[in-house]
Amino acid sequence: MPSTKDWIEFKVEVPFEFVEPVAELFRKFGKGGVAIEEAGGWNPDEGESRPERPNAILRTYMPQTAAYKSNREMIHIGVALISKLTDVSPMEERDIAEQEWEDAWKAHFTPLRIGQHLIVQPPWRRGEELPGDIVIEIDPGFAFGTGHHPTTHRVLEAMERLLVPGQDVLDVGAGSGILTVGAAKLGAGKIIGVEIDNIALKAGRANLRSNGVSGAARFYAGSLPNEHVPQGWADLVLANVNSVALTNLAPELAHATKPGGWLVAAGILTERQQGVEDAFTTAGLTITERIYDDDWVALICQMPA
């Protein structure tokens, strides 16, 4: 008869901005999957509105093997360090039986609605889809971009507004492929993604296949300049990386953007915003919109025609 304490469930609540670092911590040391769901705490029956971005609850499951004490300690250390940067709920643990864990972690992943019609969810979960909704399926176990971070969230919203069906899209720092999948399902013509991390590149290609959009998109290793990205090719460039990379890549991002085309840049902390803007302006881009979200800002820029 199986033990009733074969696995340990770890549960913690964090702001959306910290979902991906905690998910990566759980993925690395939990070994039993990562589940992400929106936190509750608001009551529509009492007239309370749903927060624009509520906290998220993360769970992982750890088998009680010989190494579990060390892995458990690493999770606690990681969460303690993250709690120095933001409000994190106390870690909760509970023992579960072997037969419970496989379905338990999958049951707690909440589909994430972004913008007007985009829904991000894992392959095994179906949300309440409305007519016109576009579903992006991302495996949260890879933790390279699940849509929860404010930067990814804002780029998806901007892309939904800007992308015209048939346009060519460049995804710089493609990660999980979440932006590329969204672009393909919004009707983009051809999409090229570049990514420097080989593990993320593998995860991204897998997500392209699972979403059935491999025919519209290609991922390549590396950054810009890239032999697979012609100059002035992209109608829309998506660059969700960081302020240092954006500053350094500003000339290449401008070169890749078609005259009259758009660049959506994110991953910028507000304290470094001015440096990125200066680099973009020097490269010939015109900043048309700034989208603020907590400590982050996304820039929407246009290449003059």
Image (tube, grey):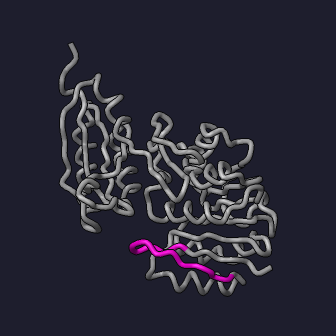
Report x, y in % for residue 145. Answer: 50, 53
Write the residue at 66% across / 86% down: 281
Does residue 199 appear to the left or right of 45 in the view shown? right
Answer with the quarter of the image where residue 99 lies: top left
Q: Residue at x 43, y 72 (%)?
A: 293
- In the image, residue 3 sits, relative to residue 1, either above or below, namely below
Q: Is residue 4 left or right of residue 288?
A: left
Q: Which residues are magenta?
A: 286-298
Main SS of the magenta part reads strand
Q: Position of residue 228 (x, y in %)?
A: 78, 57
**Above or below — where is 290 with respect to 31?**
below
- Please identify the quadrant where the N terminus is shown: top left
User: Residue shown at 25%/46% (left/top)?
Assistant: 11
Q: How many marks?
A: 0
Residue 92, percent across and down?
19, 46
Q: Residue at x 65, y 54 (%)?
A: 183
Question: Residue 218, image x and y in percent?
Answer: 72, 49
Quarter of the figure with the C terminus: bottom right
Residue 255 colored magenta? Answer: no
Front residue (pair 278, 163): 163
